[in-house]
Amino acid sequence: MSQRTTAKERRSGLAHDEKRPGERWRAPCACDPAGSRGRLYAEPASPTRSPFQRDRDRILHSNAFRRLKHKTQVFIHHEGDHFRTRLTHTLEVAQIARSIARPLGLDEDLCEAISLGHDLGHPPFGHAGERALDEALRLYGGFDHNAQSLRVVTMLERRYPLFDGLNLTWETLEGLVKHNGPLTDADGTPIGTYAGKALPFAIRAYVERQDLELHHPANVEAQVAAIADDIAYDTHDIDDGLRAGLLSIADLEDAPLSGPILADIVQDYPGLDHARLVHELVRRLITAMIEDVITETRRRLAAMPEPSAEAVRSQTRPVVAFSGETANLEVVLKRFLFENLYRSDAVMRPVKLAEAVISDLYGAFFDDPSLLPDEWQSQVDPAEPPELARHIADYIAGMTDRFALSEHRRLFDATPDLG
């Protein structure tokens, strides 16, 4: 190949040794599907798909994934057709993750699999349902949606003749469990979210069967999925907050990250109508955050003596991250959203009612397991309270918002109006 850069390449900004958009290649730090640590249950290889592609497809076709369509993100599902649900949020996370992964040369299929699976364990009504189940199970180890996602893909999905769960690769399971960082120190003591308490039951039980190396950071693709989740939350919750009338453009003019972008849009398009202004703000904000992550991640990888998938797992900090300035501004933006959106009366009122619905359902099923569907009654021994508690949590966590309300109406004389 000629070492001379052509005029056409110079005009397009592509030198001879640069990769063209859409071209696939693999960075040294990426997980190689050909070198996967495999599945808990051995299966023949697919002649047409990599192991990570198969993981993505299995998640996409699961019952738990379809149910995300009717699970709350921030706003209860019936408040409007255009608000995000847990499903649309998940798809947006996957898209952002791929946008980060491709220019870094990472495995996009693994990024997508982890992104699509990261919220499978969420109960109805989002974090409100999670809090209610955690409180209900306080004597039996609590409830954690991240651990429940692992329980879904390793046990609760029953689709295959020879095993329960989806039998995902080690790398995908590692990513689902550790995408927010390691769970223990080298001695096995819980850290981070779980510091000062025991690890969730589902995680403790599974790692007895397959070691997910909870003391190491997750693979680089999982780290991409985690930061894509943050970007999706920050930007799309702004969009939904504006749509709900709980945020205004004036509020965002002084907010971190969004303020300078708004000023640029107004300068570029004076008099732009509100709807287009909001879409342009969200689009530019997503782009700016993605580009910042790509730049900072490249810098961190370049500083590693020999970047590899295993070297990433040995680092003391994430290799996928915002730059220092953007990280600080993103923390302030999250605080702004908590104060002005998530803790607003319009959001908190249905949240409290939703928590009561979940608490009522759990109490009713625990006091009288015969209220469970026949197939669920046959799978548990009511004389074993810890087993019964987790079994009921599995049943409730798999519900959609509307099915939880339907079950509440079946069992109780009065069901709260969440509208």
Image: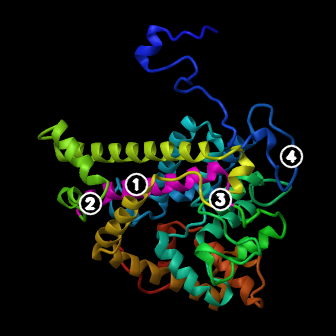
Q: Amino acid at mark 3?
A: Leu
Q: Is residue 84 visible?
A: no
**Is 234 covered by the magenta stretch?**
yes
Near-viewer residue (313 or 210): 313
Quadrant of the rendered image containing residue 280 = top left
Near-viewer residue (334 or 312): 312
Q: How much space separates mark 1 and mark 3, taking CA atoms?
A: 25 Å
Instruction: Give residue 255's mark.
Output: 2
Instruction: Give residue 126's mark.
Output: none
At a point 65% along the width and 30% down the height, the residue shown is 25
Q: How much space separates mark 4 and mark 3, taking CA atoms?
A: 21 Å
Q: Check disc 3 and report the residue beneath it.
A: 176
At a point 53% along the width and 75% down the height, the residue shown is 130
Q: Is residue 101 above or below residue 152?
A: above
- Which badge, 2 or 1, comes first in the chain's sequence? 2
- Left or right of 160? Residue 412 is left
Q: Amino acid at mark 4?
A: Glu
Q: How much space separates mark 2 and mark 4, taking CA atoms?
A: 51 Å
Q: Amino acid at mark 2?
A: Ala
Q: Residues within 10 Å of mark 4 (few under 14, many from 20)?
A: few
- Which badge, 4 or 1, comes first in the chain's sequence? 4
- Which badge, 2 or 3, comes first in the chain's sequence? 3
**Is 12 covered by the magenta stretch?**
no
Q: Is residue 346 above or below residue 249?
A: below
- Which badge, 1 or 3, comes first in the chain's sequence? 3
Quadrant of the rendered image containing residue 391 = bottom right
- Which badge, 4 or 3, comes first in the chain's sequence? 4
Mark 2 or mark 4: which is in front?
Answer: 2
Q: Residues within 10 Å of mark 3 (few under 14, many from 20)?
A: many
Region in magenta = 217-245
